[in-house]
Image (cartoon, rainbow, N blue to C red):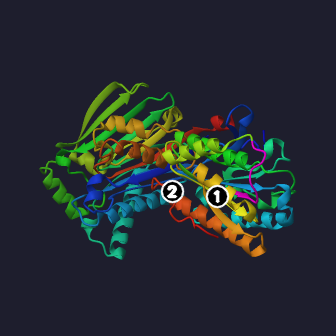
Amino acid sequence: MIRFHTDHYFHIGSAHYTSGKPCQDYSLSSASDDVACAIVSDGCSTGRHTDVGSRVLALSTMQAIRDHVKASSGVLNTAVVSITSRQQQIISTSRLILGLDWMDMLATCGYVYLTQSGGFIHVQGDGVVALKYRDGHIKMSRYLWADNMPFYPSYDYDSINNFVKAHGGDLDALRLFRTTVSTRLDGTIAEAEDKEFTLREGLNGVLTRLSLEELAQLEFIAVFSDGVTQIDNVDWKDAVTRFLSFKSLEGEFAKRRMMWEIKSLQKTSKGPIDDIAYAVVRIERERENEG
Amino acid sequence: MPRMMTDDSMTVGKVGTGVQAFQFSGARIERLGATEYTLVTIAVDVTGSTKGFADELRKSLITAVESCKKSPRSANLLLRVILFSGSLDGGIEEIHGFKPLSEVDTNSYPQLNPEGITPLFDAAFSAVGATNAYAKTLMYKEFNANGIVFVITDGDDNVSRSTVAMVKREMERGARGEEIESLIGVVVGINAAAFRYKLEEFAKGTGMQYIDVGEATKGKLAKLAQFVSQSVSSQSQALGTGGPSQNIAPTI
């Protein structure tokens, strides 16, 4: 038996702050006895009201996960397909009810869904995923689309066609790149690996499955918006490491960490230039709790 | 040393050294879940001269605490209540250390039994010093923190081991903003017309503010409770701005 704890935070970047624009990143998380989820969404800066779109997308994803939990009791076999389908359905309905344009809905989404029997991370678009192990080392992956033109899960049939054309029209072309880095305990890089995905693979989102055995080795799983890669004078790998260096774990642990770190960064630099968001699941093994 | 009333959920700290040391308690940091806290201390004079209005003073204290519980910032307040009198062991007795308001049961506050002479400087030093010390621990764990201290008295100091300079040093630590974002200290005089000059001098010498309630009537004590809860709310809203609240009323 494992116990889940979650928290999340999002923060406006200096570029949007100084130009009077809203924060277009959003994050959400939730944990119960059996299930945990953590979601980030990043609105497209050249869209319209994508601050609203990112929220609608995150909330739709959360509801889709809740619906999956109810319908399947946490069985994960077809979870990604049913969550994506339900997510699309809720986004479409919400958009119409709220009178939003499809341009308002352009946002990426990264989420973690964990149960007592394992879980997965699903990246729809771009961003960073980080796994912090119990021994302290971190494995982090950055997802980046060619021409900085990410896939948005709210695309409908026509939009997907346009998106494919904008990426050159070849579904088998390698258009999504993942850089994975593992750090040692002192923060130095132990190994790095690059992987490329085809446009076809990118349209489905990249899935990372986590077995129960893997979960047992992990202490934190975090999803970040790509804002973590755009902090003034800070390499994204250092930023991830800092944001996962929690000093206390109760309640709003992630919020405290990121707020404190940003305040510290802003003493000597602009801090986050782009909006930044993260959502974190802490995995506590039951026997730790008993001890 | 003051008597401590702690349990496993609390941790004990110390301010000062040697015979000028005072213990305090506070909620274990690992139990706290918010991002920021205002540390509130209410120090109540229970020397012999407060006998005539002790019951009303207790009611005023309880009203102030219950009002704080209704504040929109109540989840971000940690409250410590101490009594001071020369008749108490070490001059100070902690009713409870810094703890979330949701865990404060005012029904368990003891009846005040005034006797003894006035360790005013000790009360102020313990209150301000403990606020700084606990805030430092919070800030180290990345909780933002500020503080407000009320020392409610009807007379001048005549028995303390602490000095005005010691209280001043602690208030200055608060003003520097290194260990606590900001700190407000308020000396509240009640039935203290004869000592007004002395108390004003003490407040001025330490960097605290002096507020005179006037006579210890039911109405004035009710206003004191209102003043305390409003000042707490105001200081808590200032948290994150980098400075103290500018809205502490100059009179009651």
Depth order, front residue of B61/A77: B61
Q: Which mark is residue A24?
A: none
Please name the residue shown 33% across and 70% down the image: A95
Amino acid beneath label 2: Pro
For residue A179, side relative to residue A262 (left or right) = left
Amino acid beneath label 1: Glu
- Tell me the residue that label 2 is attached to: B244
For residue A193, say whether it is visible: yes
In the picture, the quarter occupied by the C terminus of chain B is bottom right
Depth order, front residue of A16/B219: B219
Measured in 3D between alpha carbons, the distance from the residue under mark 2 to the one under mark 1, in whole angstroms, is 21 Å
Residue A34 on image: x %, y %: 58, 49
Depth order, front residue of B125/A43: B125
Q: Is residue A125 above or below residue B90?
A: below
Tell me the subunit letter for badge 2. B
Label 1 crowd (10 A; few <14 / some 14-19 / many >=20): some
- Tell me the residue that label 1 is attached to: B200
In the picture, the quarter occupied by the N terminus of chain B is top right
Please name the residue shown 68% across and 51% down the image: B99
For residue B70, say whether it is visible: no
Residue A285 on image: x %, y %: 60, 37
Question: In terms of sequence position, does the residue under pointer 2 or pointer 1 come before the other?
Answer: 1
Quarter location, residue A99: bottom left
- Asked if residue B146 lies in the magenta stretch, the reply is no
Residue A236 on image: x %, y %: 31, 38
Q: Is residue B62 above or below residue B21?
A: below
- Secondary structure, mark 1, is helix
Residue range of the region highlighted in magenta in the rendering: B148-160
Label 2 crowd (10 A; few <14 / some 14-19 / many >=20): many
Disc 2 with disc 1 on a shared chain: yes
